[in-house]
Image (cartoon, helix red, strand yellow):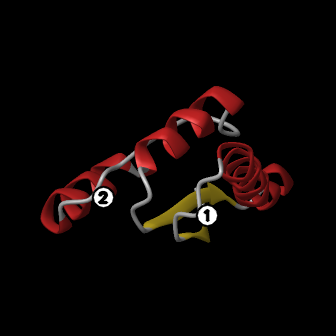
Amino acid sequence: MNDVLLPLCGQYRVNLVTGVGEMSITSVLELTRRMNGKPVRIFYVSDFDPAGQSMPCAVARKVEYFQHKHGDDADVMLFPTRVDC
């Protein structure tokens, strides 16, 4: 998907964070640290297997946890997108 997403992200001047499998706690913690109170929109692209269905929810819960823990009230929205690979 990077060959499709990188040009789009460059065109719209947005960050692209890629990974394999579910995002780790460390990765989500780094994401929440980078938010700095700014509005954040996460488009989570995953595949059509059962694990891919639960990954966006798991990331959203981790973000919620770290926001609550650090008293961050940034406007965060996560949009799950599943693709047939």
Mark number, residue 84:
1
**Which amino acid is tagged 1?**
Asp
Mark number, residue 4:
2
**Which amino acid is tagged 2?**
Val
* Real-space CA distance between mark 2 and mark 1, rounded to the nearest whole angstrom: 14 Å
Q: Which residue lies furthest to the top in this view?
A: 26
Frontmost residue, 32 versus 12: 32
Instruction: Tell me residue 13's x, y (percent).
Output: 18, 60
Q: Dot 1, crowdedness within 10 Å: few (<14), some or many (≥20)?
A: few
Instruction: Tell me residue 53's x, y (percent).
Output: 79, 61
Look at the numbered disc 1 and give the secondary structure of its residue.
Answer: loop
Q: In this view, does 39 lie above or below 67?
A: below
In the drawing, does residue 31 fall left or right of residue 13?
right
Q: Which residue is drawn at 44% across and 51% down?
A: 35
Can you say which quadrant of the picture contains the C terminus? bottom right
Q: In this view, does 51 lie above or below 78?
A: above
Mark number, residue 53:
none
Q: Residue furthest front?
A: 71
In the drawing, does residue 18 fall left or right of residue 50?
left
Q: Residue at x 14, y 65 (%)?
A: 11
- Nearer the observer: mark 2 or 1; the answer is 2
